[in-house]
Amino acid sequence: MNQVYDCALGRVTCLVDGAKVFGAEVFPSVEPDYRLALLGAAGVTEIRTEFNAFLLELPGQPLTLVDVGCGQLFGPDAGKLAGLLAAQGIAASDVERVIFTHLHGDHVGGALDGDTQVFPNAEMLVHKDELTRWWGTGRPGDLFQSVYAGRIQPVCDAQELSPGIVTWHLPGHTPGHMGLRLADELVIVGDIMHAEVLQLPDPQIASMYDDDPEIGRASRLAALAEIADRGLVYAGGHQLGPSKFGRLKRQGKSFVKVAA
Ligand SMILES: [Zn+2]
């Protein structure tokens, strides 16, 4: 499923690279009864997730992807990004810039075809702390740095990457995890949440994928509060449909998503 949001800078399209169901172990602090209650309140029976990437078609700016999906790393249920781009007449060689929210396999895997480049002409932008996090680990974020050596540009917090696109450091999930602010209207918030059915009603819930759950919790709470209080439109790495772009309303200590 693709979904489009037209912001002041141009068109942003969510491209769904794949999907899976999370087991209960992904949210280790959530007791079974509580999990069932939260799922029941959302009208679902399992913790589904989707792997989202974003295509930025902004007049006067480089053709940009935000994250590139799983590639071959997560089996046949993912790795659909290339086909989705092709369906829009976009070849990998047309992509001029990739901005990574972080370097987990489900966000960087699509840049790797074994140990060769998928995007031969794109500048690669990554938060500087993310490069340090993965360097020498043998993980996809390390392989990525070898494969794209010389074409990776480290960025930092609150950096304007091009007119109207500003980085938003949201550490915790990983040290260099970041979101993007577009025209101060739309924010792409990466992996501050992995399952909105649990983490919007209870933003204290962390996932097992968070490097530092405490720091991640603070980033999540700050981001959700700002989205709600400033009326921003948001999207992220694991939001489900039908509306990939939403706004947030506060409800006590919880947040409720409404379609943008
Ligand atoms: Zn992710």
Image: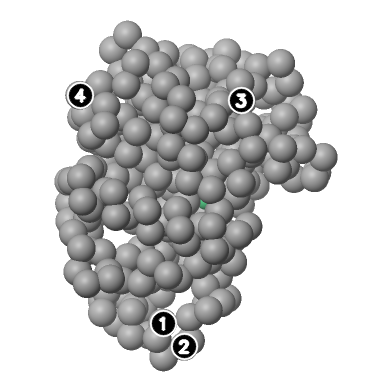
The residue at the point 20 percent across, 63 percent down is 250
Q: Earlier in the sequence, mark 1 or mark 3?
A: 1
Within 10 Å of disc 3 (Cα), the crowding (few <14, some 14-19, many 20+) is: few
Q: Position of residue 144 (x, y in %)?
A: 70, 32
Amino acid of disc 2: Pro
Amino acid of disc 1: Arg
Judged by depth in the image, the label closer to the viewer, 2 or 4, is 4
Measure the alpha-carbon separation of dots 4 and 3: 26 Å
| Residue beneath disc 3 | 154
Amino acid of disc 3: Pro
* Disc 2 to disc 1: CB gap under 8 Å: yes
Measure the alpha-carbon separation of dots 1 and 3: 39 Å
Which residue is farthest bottom?
33
Within 10 Å of disc 1 (Cα), the crowding (few <14, some 14-19, many 20+) is: some
| Residue beneath disc 4 | 8
Judged by depth in the image, the label closer to the viewer, 4 or 3, is 3
Within 10 Å of disc 4 (Cα), the crowding (few <14, some 14-19, many 20+) is: few
The residue at the point 61 percent across, 21 percent down is 153
| Residue beneath disc 2 | 32
Query: On screen, 258 above or below 27?
Result: above
Judged by depth in the image, the label closer to the viewer, 3 or 2, is 3
The label shown at residue 35 is 1
Query: On screen, 105 above or below 217?
Result: above
Res. 211 image quadrant: bottom right
